[in-house]
Image: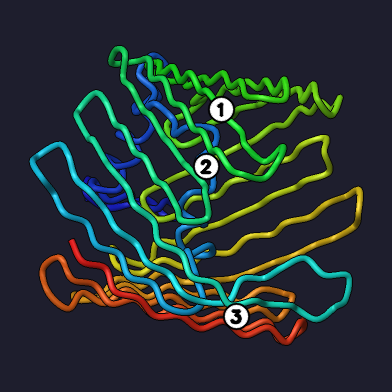
Amino acid sequence: MAGLVPPGATAVPADVSHTAHTKHDEKTDYMNLPCPIPYEELHREALMSLKPETFEGLRFDFTKGLNQKFSLSHSVSMGPTEIPSQSAETIKIPTANYEFGANFIDPNLMLIGRVLTDGRLNARVKWDLTDNLTVKANAQLTNEPHMSHGMFNFDYKGKDFRSQFQMGNGALFGASYIQSVTPHLSLGGEVFWAGQHRKSGIGYAARYETDKMVGTGQVANTGIVALSYVQKVSDKVSLASDFMYNYLSRDATASVGYDYILRQCRLRGKIDSNGCTTSYLEERLNMGLNFILSAEIDHMKKDYKFGFGLTVG
């Protein structure tokens, strides 16, 4: 009779009691929180699915490695280019460009340069001064007046935080900071000052991440409210959605998309509330040989873009 359960009482299985006791004993170690991603990459999972690099026309990219650190690249693109217009219709003119590039990639230093036949010159530098401090520089030189620009970034990676300071031409200054507050939640903020235009701004952001999902929210006094959510269905399938709202102009846009990784290809696509549908396919034909298909259909503007390309190297 000693093993009988009294009336009205419920026996708790030993394994359930042990699990509850273990979870109760688990405590968050706030002295060993993970380091968050950079503030500027808060929406990177959603952007991978919702913002593929679509193009129109033909594109051919060839990269030749000269040694383990240095490589040369050649890129040819042919297709229409949109020009600004006062009318609702999209005006396009046929264009063709050739781009020559040189790349130097070292564990602590990365140098990338591009020059185009239209006179543009692009340069990127990333230098890891220490394990925690990184310097980045971006520059673009053009023949058009007031279109050349340059930017310097100083990134510091702490144990559970990241900070960044930016400065560029036009008296542009900015700073951002993001801090992990729990193992899954990080909070941050940014400020900027554009001296040439006499404008300043401040923004706040939050990011919650687990093994199966990523949710982000961002708001700034410039009127932008950005929300994104990514659900990792499996290691190869992700579903994403975002919502953009400007409370000054009352404009709102929402989109949903997917990212599907197969054995030989990767398929991404999205559709937004403006009726714009995008699809992007990367097919691996052989080692170092990829075939690309790109499509974008805007039903509201009656703008249709289709492209295909080949990447070698």
Q: Where is residue 254 shown, x and y percent of the image?
A: 70, 66
Tell me which label, 3 or 1, sits earlier in the chain: 1
The residue lying at 23 percent from left, 47 percent from top is 15
Using the rendered image of the protein, determine whether residue 8 is visible from the camera's viewpoint.
no
**Label 3: which secondary element:** strand
Mark 3 crowd level (few <14, some 14–19, many ≥20, 10 Å Cα): some
Residue assigned mark 1? 151
Quadrant position of residue 168: top right
Residue assigned mark 2? 208
Mark 1 crowd level (few <14, some 14–19, many ≥20, 10 Å Cα): some
Residue type pointed to by label 3? Thr
Q: Nearer the viewer, mark 3 or mark 1?
A: 1
Q: Where is residue 37 shown, x and y percent of the image?
A: 44, 34
Question: Who is closer to the viewer here, 88 or 218?
Answer: 88
Please say if the residues under marks 2 and 1 sit with CB atoms less than 8 Å apart. no
Tell me which label, 2 or 1, sits earlier in the chain: 1
Q: Is residue 28 above or below residue 240?
A: above
Gap in Å between the C-alphas at discs 3 and 2? 28 Å
Residue type pointed to by label 2? Tyr
The residue lying at 39 percent from left, 26 percent from top is 35
Gap in Å between the C-alphas at discs 2 and 1? 30 Å
Q: Where is residue 167 shown, x and y percent of the image?
A: 61, 20
Q: Is residue 136 above or below residue 92?
A: above
